[in-house]
Amino acid sequence: MSEATIFVVEDEPSFVDALTIGLTREGFKVEFAIDGAEALDRFDSVDPDLVLLDVMLPKVSGIDVCRQLRKRTQVPIIMVTAKGAEIDTVVGLEVGADDYVTKPYRLRELVARMRAVLRRAPEHHNGAPLDSACLAVDGVSLDPGQHLVTVNGESLSLPLKEFELLHLLLANAGQVLPRETLIDRVWGLDYVGDTKTLDVHIKRLRGKIETDPSQPTRITTIRGLGYKYSR
């Protein structure tokens, strides 16, 4: 954990300086880029454990950087948005960000979110690890070992958090999973964000595995409780 490399993509010098000092004191190695184009160019050479990505960037926006990174990596991405920029938050999550923070933020909160993301290995969740056996329910198949999903025989590429969420839902098909359980198991017991992240990931999953996402039959909402994967 203490050796993790954080790739900070931020064009405001004051934030870069503060983050470099603060994150280094917390035991992280910090690399940074000052615009979206540089972030994409340097990503492979930096080989970060986590990307802290500002939305408003010169040359290539943070949203587009996130979208392009998700085509080639599952590295955790935390988006940084302006306070009250609801659309940036939602779009960032929809293109594959794992979490978000809003400016201005406290370093303590940011570090807590970063550690929560870094603590979770892809094959495990907080609590007991999920079974590594392949799952198949109603035309959707999931192979945890190979990170493969097929829907009615067609291969489907999923970002890490969507994969973990689908894995948990399939493993408990027919059972109602409370929102708190889903968040704790996929995002961690120490997750300090809000529940919007879960809702956006559910929406994205429905868009990929449902015949009609506006009237879902696989991932159903149990009002006041949570979600259920129907058999």
Image: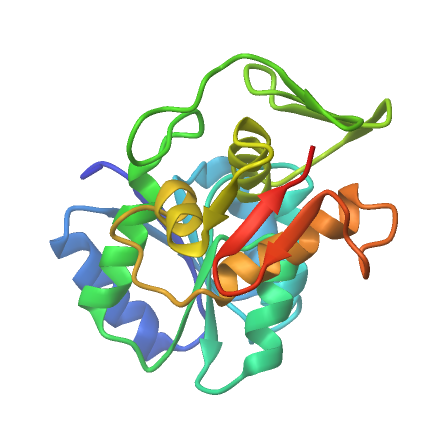
Residue at the (18%, 53%) spot, across then down: 24
Task: Report the front residue among 213 and 116.
Answer: 213
Q: Residue furthest left?
A: 25
Q: Quadrant of the N terminus?
A: top left
Q: Is residue 123 left or right of residue 116?
A: right
Horizontal and vertical percent position of residue 224: 49, 65
- Number of numbered markers: 0
Rendered position, 83 above or below 134: below
Horizontal and vertical percent position of residue 85: 54, 84
Residue at the (41%, 51%) spot, across then down: 183
Q: Quadrant of the C terminus?
A: top right
Would residue 57 be visible to someone looking at this image? no
- The scheme the figure's colours follow is rainbow
Q: Residue furthest bottom?
A: 84
Horizontal and vertical percent position of residue 199: 57, 61
Rendered position, 9 above or below 26: below
Task: Report the front residue among 160 and 129.
Answer: 129
Q: Is residue 36 left or right of residue 130?
A: right
Task: Report the front residue among 224 and 119.
Answer: 224
Would residue 70 be visible to someone looking at this image? yes
| Displayed quadrant of residue 221 | bottom right
Q: Is residue 58 left or right of residue 231?
A: left
Residue at the (35%, 48%) spot, across then down: 6
Q: Is residue 135 left or right of residue 215?
A: left
Rendered position, 190 above or below 142: below
Horizontal and vertical percent position of residue 230: 67, 39
